[in-house]
Amino acid sequence: MQKKIEELKRLREEAKLGGGIDKINAQHEKGKLTARERIELLADEGSFREIDEFVKHRSNDFGLDKQRIAGDGVVTGFAKINGRDAALFSQDFTVFGGSLSESHAEKICKIMDMALKLGIPVIGLNDSGGARIQEGVVSLGGYAEIFLRNTLASGVIPQISAVLGPCAGGAVYSPAITDFVFMVKNTSYMFVTGPNVVKTVTHEEVSFEELGGADTHSTKSGVAHFSFDSEVEVLEKIRQLLTFLPLNWKDKTPELEFDFKENYLQPKLDEIIPGNPNKPYDMKEIISLIVDRNEFLEVHKDYAQNIIVGFARIGGVSVGIIANQPSILAGVLDINASVKGARFIRFCDSFNIPLLVLEDVPGFLPGTEQEWNGIIKHGSKLLFAFCEATVPKVTVITRKAYGGAYDVMNSKHIRGDFNFAWPSAEIAVMGPKGAVEIIFKKEISSSKKPTEKLEQLLSEYIEKFANPYIAAERGYIDEVIIPSETRQRLIAAFQLLKTKVDSNPKKKHSNIPL
Ligand code: HXC
């Protein structure tokens, strides 16, 4: 027996070396960690249990029969992350450039199937040259098997992708279907066709980084939800993200123990809104003052910054925050902001994470660029997502809530559970100036002093309509609250809403305007 155990240990040691020392050194020289080093950083210490360590490819073409490496370019298994279970796969670039063979795909599918049965998240660390070219269509079939599982698992278990090296061609669609994509600057890239093909087809000269690097996808395309300078940071942030998420859609909303002594007033909130309604302020300051321990994990931080989305805890309860940002484009809703918000809301609703909306929005962005690119259909995604969500939904209007955007941003009418407003709220069909110019057009133009007339009518209109009380009279606002009490009110609201039950009519699935 002892001999057999020694043999097993030797085989394991061999498997752990993947493509061998030279390839590991080459990986380090590129500033990248190996597949196993990444898992060590992601998982709780000593918790990773590998499966399929000895799986090899079955191909005999192009001399592959002489290169059968245990593991076949992907490390798979289960681990604890923050003490909770997760399924992992980590592609090993030292073996055939992490390319995806039939066996490699089978390993990934196996842990995805297990994760679905167990109801635990799947985290994929991607670093791959794409389809194993020598295996041809078999490899394409392997990708399709993964895409199918990604799709079927969507909304059942959280799926997180880190792109830590190349990810090209159709391979990009697996991370894209998952809930969150992390990238690392300078060493990772994603694109459907690389710079060479781009040059041939469109004659554009573009580098790998510019075409599909972390900056591009976190600022321009929105494909990446998070981008960081190092792999270590990426892996740390995945751990942090998981603390906010349940294990699966049936799991309860994650909650940390909360000491109600932390239920304090925040007097600074009474001073944040500027006297001049057109002056910007930073909504992130408000977020930081109302969440537990000022901890806010922002998603899509550098993309469509006129809307802010991310995770925090309020009274220990995980919440997803969607907030207009008055300091960027006055917090207006445009196409990118709408899509960003909608995707986030749908993730939270799938996984029982309550929603908090902080609202200061002048409306939807006007212009041909927006109209021709479909602000109607994209804006309606945000509306649809809010309407459809059945998780606890709380809104705080800090200042402007104008026009359609008032309805869209989780108004009472679309099933907001608690709709609060600060005394600074202005809830109206449109901004005072636009409104006065339309309804008093004749009076202003026929006046001998049109500027003075406009000013007079404007101040009358502001006095009458730019406040929260007309909406409160109707019950559209449940309560006008003192800003410094916001944190306390939200803690109480989310505690009360823990027993909320709501549902949508039975159907196969809805048809969100895509
Ligand atoms: C087989 C591959 C491979 C692949 C890389 N290798 N990609 N082997 N199939 N797709 C091997 C290389 O031959 C090399 O082996 C080792 O991995 C490391 O690759 P290098 O080229 O030395 O590394 P680097 O210089 O860092 O370049 C990485 C790379 C490049 C940019 C990813 O390897 C590359 O362009 N690969 C091909 C990418 C590609 O076209 N893939 C198919 C895309 S289509 P040795 O033994 O020399 O070390 C696709 C379709 C998916 O994926 C469709 C799904 C629907």
Image (cartoon, rainbow, N blue to C red):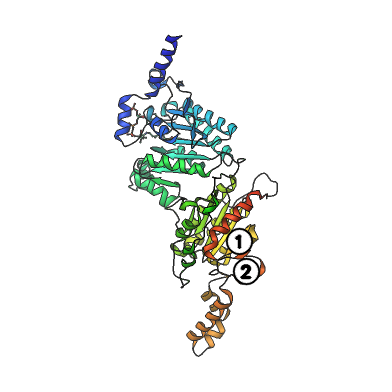
Image quadrant, ligand 1: top left
- x 41%, y 41%: residue: 234
Q: Quadrant of residue 376?
A: bottom right
- x 59%, y 48%: residue: 349
Q: Which mark is residue 419?
A: 1
What type is the residue that disc 1 sits on? Asn
Q: Residue furthest right?
A: 506
Q: Residues within 10 Å of mark 2 (few under 14, many from 20)?
A: some
Q: Which mark is residue 383?
A: none
Q: Is residue 91 visible?
A: yes
- Report the side of 413 relative to 166 (left or right): right
Q: Position of residue 233 (x, y in %)?
A: 39, 42
Q: Secondary structure at mark 2?
A: helix
Q: Quadrant of residue 99?
A: top left
Q: Position of residue 182 (x, y in %)?
A: 43, 43
Q: Is mark 2 within 8 Å of ligand 1?
A: no
Instruction: Calculate the distance from the C-alpha at mark 2 to the C-alpha at mark 1.
Output: 10 Å
- x 54%, y 32%: residue: 112
Image position of 445 with respect to 218: above or below: below
Q: Position of residue 152 (x, y in %)?
A: 58, 37
User: Is the residue under label 1 in contact with that under label 2 (CB below 8 Å)?
Assistant: no
Q: Residues within 10 Å of mark 1 (few under 14, many from 20)?
A: many
Q: How many marks?
A: 2
Q: Which mark is residue 471?
A: 2
Image position of 138 with respect to 398: above or below: above
Q: Position of residue 408 (x, y in %)?
A: 58, 60
Task: Name the residue nearer the viewer: 47 or 170.
Answer: 47
Q: Is residue 188 visible?
A: no
Task: Name the residue nearer the viewer: 49 or 168.
Answer: 49
Q: Secondary structure at mark 1?
A: strand
Q: Earlier in the sequence, mark 2 or mark 1?
A: 1
